[in-house]
Image (tube, rainbow, N blue to C red):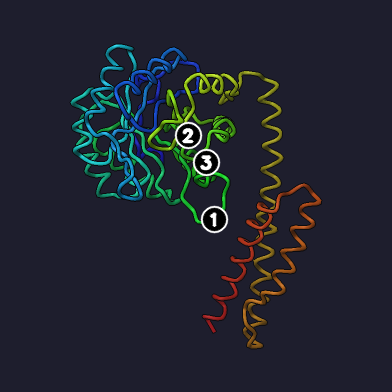
Amino acid sequence: MENRLDIAPISEWGMFEEPRPCVIAGPCSAESEIQVMETARQLKAAGLNVFRAGIWKPRTHPGSFEGVGAQGLKWMQRAKRELGLKIATEVASEKHVFECLKYGVDLVWLGARTTANPFLVQEIADALKDVDIPVLVKNPVNADIDLWIGALERLNAAGIRKLGVIHRGFSTFAKNKYRNEPGWQVAIELRSRYPRLPFFCDPSHMGGRREYLKEISQRSLDLGLEGLMIESHCDPTCALSDAGQQLVPQDLREMLMSLTVRENDSDSLEYKENIDQLRSQIDVIDENLLNLFASRMKISRRIGEYKRDNNIAIIQASRWDTVLENMVRKGNELGLSDKFLTTVFNAIHEASVQIQNDILEKK
């Protein structure tokens, strides 16, 4: 699928300097000229060169602070002019795009709510047609990888080659210590489909609290993501939005210095030989797993036939609960996690139920 996107490598964007990670930092919202300039100065002193700030803030409830509007772009333009920073903000409409271009914004991104709306994505893509600035796309609020890819395709079709994504997690009703469920498996899947697509993580919105920023940032770098978008405010205690997830620039610098950046590959012959041997072992195990899955499904098919012939319901919930409990217990003894075991065995069980259901429907 990768050939469906014509992507310019991040080295051609003219935005970031080595070494990794590439960092976009700044306040959740532009609140005043003083706040913008002071935060920008401190971030510049911390060694960062791409400054972000929210100008238009889509909020869940009306009456909340929804951004200062286009006047905030004047403040960002001043930071760009006086401090030599690149400036970036979120856009959610054609009007936003035109305002950003008027004030020399260097990079724009689409928020999670916008990505989920193909009408808005197309409107923004049309407004950006033939404009040579980088565009980042946050994942949609729900874990729909095709919706995410569709937004990328619309922008790419408009001629935007400096294209990348931001992983900020997904909204969920499930209890989670983070503000948004990370859903790393979705990011990994997108990465596997488009390995050359520049990939950022937004630990601020994923975590929702300062104390989670480092662990999320490190996890994203461990997965090989290129960059981070992190919220930073000169005085977070006074922030008008998302105060709890913003760092002062000095703390941000210290956190970034503490991160370990993983290399994508190594020239070491010893590493390559060892990693190839281990991967070969995994390939053999995976083939064995496929054969075991096929054998299990054959037995499930025979069970379905017996149930059909004897007019027995497909699901016996109490038996499955007992089986799953035993598997989790035995798996724990082998060092496997509850979440992994329940996910794998529930998927196997659902496939078995579907096979048996198909048999009954063909009766």
Residue of label 1: 174
Residue of label 2: 201
Please state, as top left, top right, bottom left or bottom right, where the C terminus lies in the image.
Answer: bottom right
Residue 89 vs 293, above or below: the answer is above
Identify the secondary structure beneath mark 3: helix
The answer to which of marks 3 and 2 sits earlier in the sequence is 3
Q: CA distance from mark 3 to mark 1?
A: 21 Å
Identify the secondary structure beneath mark 1: loop
Q: CA distance from mark 3 to mark 2?
A: 12 Å
In the displayed orientation, state which residue is furthest to the front: 238
Crowd around label 2: few <14 · some 14–19 · many ≥20 (10 Å)? many
Name the amino acid type tagged 2. Answer: Cys
Residue 86: give x, y in percent of width and height: 33, 19
Q: CA distance from mark 2 to mark 1?
A: 21 Å
Residue 284: give x, y in percent of width and height: 70, 45
Residue at 73% in and 49% down: 336
Residue 22, by quadrant, is top left
Q: Is there a contact, CB below 8 Å, between mark 2 and mark 1?
A: no
**64 relative position to 48: left or right:** left
Residue 344 seen in this snapshot: yes
Identify the secondary structure beneath mark 2: strand
Residue 61 vs 298, above or below: the answer is above
Q: Nearer the viewer, residue 292 or 52?
A: 52
Please state, as top left, top right, bottom left or bottom right, where the N terminus lies in the image.
Answer: top left
The answer to which of marks 2 and 1 sits earlier in the sequence is 1
Q: Nearer the viewer, residue 288 or 235?
A: 235
The label shown at residue 188 is 3
